[in-house]
Image (cartoon, rainbow, N blue to C red):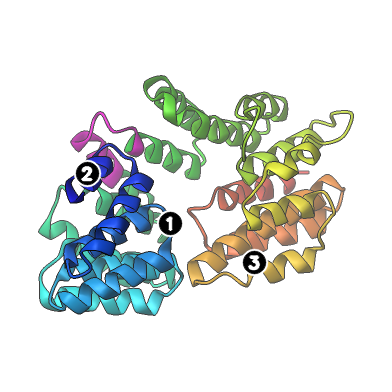
C-alpha cells in the first residue's frame, strides 16, 4: 500500500496518493514517514490545515528532523502565519545547514516586507547550492522588490542558462521585461514561451494582452485577452478587469464583457475588484478588503491592485485629478512585482501628458 501511494505520487496523482496514505496510516499509525509523505501531498493539494496536522504528528515522532520543520514552515507561510514560518525555519537551521530552510525564511521575510533581510537569506542559500534555481528565482523577485532590476535580470538569465528546457524561467524573464516597461521585447519573449510550451499559452496570452494595454493598443488588447477566455471554467480576475478597461478605453458599444464573465471569477479578492469596476461594490469597501490581507506583502499587493483599478476607472470617467491620485497611491505601495504597479506608472505618465 505504501508503494502504491508512492507510485501514484510519482505519476502526479496526488489525490489518489493522499487517499492511499490515509488508508495506510489507518492500518499502521506508528509509521512516522507516512505522515510526512501525506503532509507533503496535502500541501500540494492546498489542504494546508490537514498538512500542518500531519507535520505536527511527524515531528512528535522525529523531533530532530530538519525537513519536518521546514515543511511545517511552508504550510504555516501558506496559511499566513509568517512568525510561525520564520520560527520553523530557524529551528531547521539550528539542526542543519539546510538551503531550503533559508529559502523558506527568505520568503517569510519578504511576506513581512523585510526584503533586505530576505535577500541575505537567499544569497546564503545560493552560496550553499548555486544550482538551487527555485531560490534563484525568489532572489530575482527580491531584487525586483528592491528596484535592483539588472541584478534580477542576471539571476533569471543564469537560471535560463542552467535550465534551457524549463519555460518557467523564460516566462519570469518575460515578466521582468514587462515590469521594466519594455513591452515590445516582453511580447516577443511571451510569444516564444507560447511557441515552446502549450501549457503556458493561456497564461502568456493574458500577459500579452496586458502588454498591449500598457502600450495603449486597446483594440489589440481586447483581441488578445479574448483569445485567453475558454468556453467553460474559472478565469483569472485580472484578465476580466483589464479586458473591461480596454473595452471602455476603446469606446466599444454595448455592455462590457466583464458582466458575463463575473460569475466565472472565483477568486474572492479578484471578484471584488471586478465588482467595483461594474459599480457593484463601493470604493471604500474595496480598500477595506485590501487592507485585510494577512501579510505586509499581501496587503501592499492588494492595495496596489485596488488603487490602480480605482485610478484607471476614474480616468475613464474623465476624472483626471482623482484618477492620478489613485494611481500615485498604487505606485506608492512599492509592490513592484504586481502587473498593476507597472501599469499604474504607465497610466500616470500617459495621463500627465494630456
Where is residue 52? Give x, y as percent: 35, 70
Q: Alpha-carbon distance for marks 3 and 2?
A: 44 Å
Q: Residue at x 63, y 72 (%)?
A: 291
Contact flag, marks 3 and 2 (Cβ < 8 Å): no
| Magenta stretch, residue numbers | 154-168
Q: Alpha-carbon distance for marks 2 and 1?
A: 22 Å
- Is 321 drawn above or below residue 70 in the view shown? above
- Visible residue check, residue 117: yes
Q: Residue at x 42, y 68 (%)?
A: 49
Task: Between label 2 and label 1, give the one nearer the viewer.
Answer: 2
Look at the image and say whether residue 167 sits in the magenta stretch.
yes
Contact flag, marks 2 and 1 (Cβ < 8 Å): no
Q: Toward the viewer: 7 or 102? A: 7
**Residue that numbered label 1 is attached to:** 46
**Residue that numbered label 2 is attached to:** 4
Q: Residue furthest front?
A: 27
Q: Quadrant of the C terminus?
A: top right
Q: Residue at x 37, y 22 (%)?
A: 196
The label shown at residue 120 is: none
Amino acid at each position: 500500500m505504501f508503494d502504491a501511494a508512492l507510485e501514484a505520487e510519482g505519476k502526479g496523482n496526488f489525490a489518489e496518493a493522499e487517499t492511499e496514505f490515509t488508508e495506510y496510516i489507518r492500518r499502521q499509525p506508528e509509521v512516522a514517514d507516512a505522515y510526512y509523505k501525506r503532509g507533503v501531498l496535502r500541501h500540494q493539494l492546498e489542504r494546508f490545515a490537514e498538512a500542518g496536522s500531519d507535520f505536527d504528528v511527524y515531528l512528535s515522532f522525529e523531533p530532530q528532523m530538519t525537513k519536518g520543520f521546514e515543511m511545517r514552515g511552508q504550510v504555516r507561510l501558506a496559511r499566513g502565519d509568517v512568525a510561525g514560518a520564520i520560527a520553523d525555519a530557524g529551528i531547521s537551521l539550528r539542526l542543519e545547514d539546510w538551503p531550503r530552510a533559508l529559502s523558506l525564511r527568505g520568503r517569510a521575510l519578504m511576506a513581512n516586507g523585510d526584503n533586505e533581510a530576505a535577500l541575505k537569506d537567499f544569497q546564503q542559500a545560493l552560496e550553499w547550492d548555486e544550482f538551487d534555481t527555485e531560490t534563484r528565482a525568489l532572489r530575482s523577485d527580491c531584487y525586483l522588490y528592491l528596484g535592483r532590476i539588472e541584478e534580477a535580470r542576471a539571476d533569471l538569465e543564469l537560471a535560463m542558462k542552467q535550465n534551457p528546457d524549463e519555460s518557467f524561467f523564460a516566462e519570469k524573464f518575460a515578466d521582468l521585461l514587462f515590469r521594466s516597461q519594455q513591452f515590445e521585447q516582453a511580447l516577443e519573449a511571451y510569444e516564444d514561451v507560447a511557441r515552446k510550451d502549450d501549457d503556458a499559452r493561456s497564461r502568456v496570452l493574458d500577459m500579452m494582452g496586458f502588454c498591449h494595454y500598457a502600450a495603449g493598443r486597446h483594440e489589440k488588447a481586447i483581441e488578445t485577452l479574448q483569445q485567453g477566455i475558454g468556453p467553460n471554467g474559472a478565469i483569472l480576475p485580472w484578465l476580466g478587469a483589464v479586458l473591461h478597461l480596454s473595452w471602455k478605453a476603446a469606446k466599444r458599444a454595448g455592455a462590457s464583457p466583464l458582466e458575463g464573465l463575473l460569475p466565472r471569477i472565483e477568486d474572492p479578492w479578484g471578484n471584488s475588484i471586478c465588482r467595483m469596476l461594474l459599480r457593484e461594490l463601493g470604493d471604500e469597501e474595496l480598500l477595506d478588503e485590501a487592507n485585510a490581507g494577512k501579510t505586509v506583502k499581501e496587503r501592499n499587493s492588494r492595495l496596489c491592485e485596488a488603487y490602480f483599478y480605482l485610478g484607471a476607472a476614474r480616468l475613464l470617467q474623465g476624472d483626471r485629478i482623482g484618477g492620478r491620485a489613485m494611481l500615485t497611491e498604487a505606485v506608492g505601495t512599492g509592490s513592484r512585482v504586481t502587473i498593476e504597479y507597472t501599469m499604474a506608472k504607465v497610466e500616470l505618465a500617459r495621463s500627465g501628458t494630456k
